Image: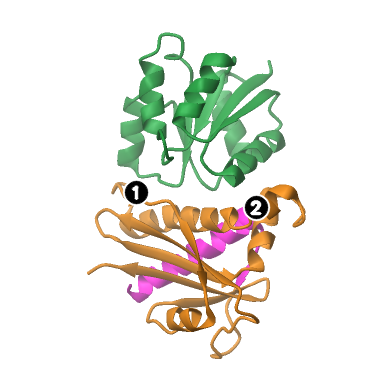
Chain colours: A green, B orange
Amino acid sequence: MAYNILIVDDSDTVRAVISKTLKMSGLDLGELHTAANGQEGLDVLREQWVDLVLTDINMPVMNGVEMIERMRADDDLAALPVVVISTEGSTTRIEELKAKGVRAYLRKPFTPEKLKEVIEDLLGG
Amino acid sequence: MDSDHGDILRRVFSEIAENMAFMFVEEPDDETPAEPENDDLVLAHMVFSGPFSGRLVIAVPAALCPEIAANVLGLDPDDELVKAKPYDALKELLNVTCGNVLPAIAGEDPVFDLTPPEIKKLDRAAWRVLRDMPGTQQHLVEDEPVLLQMSVEK
C-alpha cells in the first residue's frame, strides 16, 4: 500500500529534508503533501486523502499542538495518525503530546531507517 | 557556561554537523584567532528558556551557508532551493544543536521552550567581539572559521 503523507513545517528546507528522507527510506510512497503551518495543514487534510501526518510543533500562524487539537475535535480527522518531528524531546513534553493523541515522536536528526520503522509501526509494514 | 557544558556543546555540534550536513568539525591547529577571509559574515541565534535560560549563537562566513544547505538537502549548491533559502539550513543546524545540547546538559525530563532561530549580518568588528568573548568556541568547518557560543543567564 502506498502511503500519502502530509509534512507540516514552516521551513522549506526542513520540508525538503523530510521529503528526501522519506524517499530514501524505501517506504512505498504515494503523494507527499506539504504545509507551512497548522492552518495550511488542516486545509490540506480537508481536501486530500492523507494516511499520516508528520508535523513540527513550533510554527507561526498555527502551531502543531493546536493543529492536533483541531484534528482530534474533527470526526473526519480524529483517527488520523500524527508523528511529531521536532528538536525538542523532553520526556515530559512527549507525554503531553501523547496525551493529545500524538502516536509517535521523532527527535531531529533522524535516519531514513528510523523514520521507516516509526511509520511501519503505525501503519503496518 | 562551565567547561563541562562547553565540552558537551562541542561534542553535540560535531555530531549534528556530521549527521545532518556530512561536515566534519575540526579544531584550529594553533592559538591563532579565527579570522574570516572577507566581511560577508552571518550569525544565527536563538533563545531557550526552562530550568535555565540563555542563548545559542553560531557565526559563519556567508559563503559557507550554501555549502551547508546543499549538504543538508543533498542538492547541488547551484540548486534553486539552496539559492532561494541559503540560510535556512544554518538555522536548522543551530535549532537541532540546541534541541540536543539542552537535554545533554539538563537531562531528558525538563521542558525548554525554544525561539525560532533568526539570522543577522555581522561585520568583522562584531565577529571579533563575539570571537573574543569568554566561552566562545572556535571551530573549522570545510576550512572556514565557525564561532559557537552558548550563554546561560545567571
- Report which quarter residue B60 is drawn in: bottom right
Q: Residue at x 57, y 18 (%)?
A: A51
Task: Provide the chain ID for the residue under circle 2.
Answer: B
Is B2 contained in the magenta span?
Answer: yes
Q: Does the magenta-highlighted stretch encompass residue A53?
A: no
Callout in the foreground (1, 2):
2
Residue B29: which quarter of the image?
bottom right
Range shown magenta: B1-25
Mark 1 → mark 2, Cα distance in angstroms: 26 Å
Q: Residue furthest top?
A: A75
Closest to the observer, B108 or A30: A30
Q: Quadrant of the C terminus of chain B?
A: bottom left
Mark 1 lies on residue: B108
The residue wearing badge 2 is B72
Q: Is residue A62 visible?
A: yes
Kindly give the residue lying farthest to the left in the view shown. B154
x and y, in percent, of residue A105 in the image: 45, 35
Q: Is residue B132 above or below residue A5?
A: below
Q: Is residue B109 left or right of residue B130?
A: left
Which x, y percent locates residue B145?
Answer: 59, 77
> Quadrant location of the N terminus of chain B?
bottom left
Secondary structure under badge 1?
A: loop
How packed is label 2: few (under 14 Cα within 10 Å), some, or many (20 or more)? many
* Magenta segment main secondary structure: helix
Disc 2 residue type? Val
**Image coords of residue A28 (percent x, y):** 70, 24
Label 1 sits on what residue type? Glu
